[in-house]
Image (spheres, helix red, strand yellow):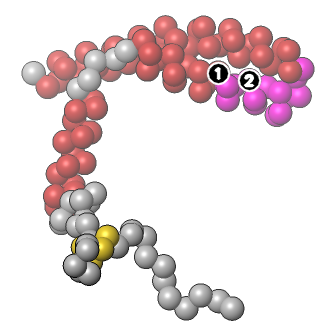
Amino acid sequence: MAQTKKKRKRKHRGTPAGTVERAGRTSRAGTREDAKAIAKQRRAERLNRAPTWRGAANRAAIAAAVFGLLLVIVFGRDIAQGLTLAVFMFLLYIPLGYATDSALYRFRQRKRG
C-alpha cells in the first residue's frame, strides 16, 4: 500500500519531560537578498584567490580523462593509444592551465586596483 504521509527529513529530539525540540533552519539565508549577497561574497572570495598548481593539476586530470575517453569511444582508438595520449595531454595541460589561471588572476587584480 502506498505511503500517505510525507516522511520527515530530520529526527525529532525528545527530552525526558516529554517535550519535542526541533533544530532550527541553519543552512539557508533568511531572504533572497541575503542569499544573493552571500553568493556574491563567495564568488568574490573565489575569484580573488591566487591560482595553485594543485588546482591546475586537478583540472588537467579531468580534461585529460575526458580527452582519453573521447579518443577511445568516439574515435575508436586503442585503449593503450588513448591512455598514452591522455597522459601526454595531462602533462601539457598542467602548465597551460596554471599559466591561464595566473594571467586571469593578474588581470582581475589589476582591474580591482
Judge whether residue 75 is colored magenta. Answer: yes
Q: Quadrant of the C terminus?
A: top left
Going 39% across and 68% down the picture, which residue do you hit? 10
Q: How crowded is mark 1: few (under 14 residues within 10 Å), some or many (20 or more)?
A: many
The correct choice, above or below, for 3 with respect to 98 in the image is below
Q: Is residue 85 left or right of residue 80?
A: left
Residue assigned mark 2: 68
Q: What residue type is labelled 1?
A: Ala
Q: Residue 54: percent from the left, percent from the top?
A: 44, 16
Q: Residue 65: percent from the left, percent from the top?
A: 67, 25
Going 20% across and 49% down the picture, which residue do you hit? 38
Residue assigned mark 1: 64
Q: Is residue 54 left or right of residue 72?
A: left
Where residue 22 sits, quadrant-wise, is bottom left
- Measure how far apart labels 1 and 2 are at the Cα level: 6 Å
Q: Residues within 10 Å of mark 2 (few under 14, many from 20)?
A: many
Q: Residue 43: percent from the left, percent from the top?
A: 26, 39
Question: Marks 2 and 1: in contact by CB < 8 Å?
Answer: yes
- Residue 113: which disc? none
The correct choice, above or below, for 13 with respect to 73 in the image is below
Judge whether residue 112 is colored magenta. Answer: no
Going 51% across and 24% down the picture, which residue do you hit? 59
Where residue 68 sits, quadrant-wise, is top right
- How many marks the image carries: the answer is 2
Q: Main secondary structure of the magenta part?
A: helix
Q: Which amino acid does label 2 sit on?
A: Gly
Element assignment for label 1: helix
Question: Which portion, as a residue range, is magenta?
Answer: 65-78
Q: Residue 30: percent from the left, percent from the top?
A: 18, 65
Closer-to-camera residue (47/6)? 6
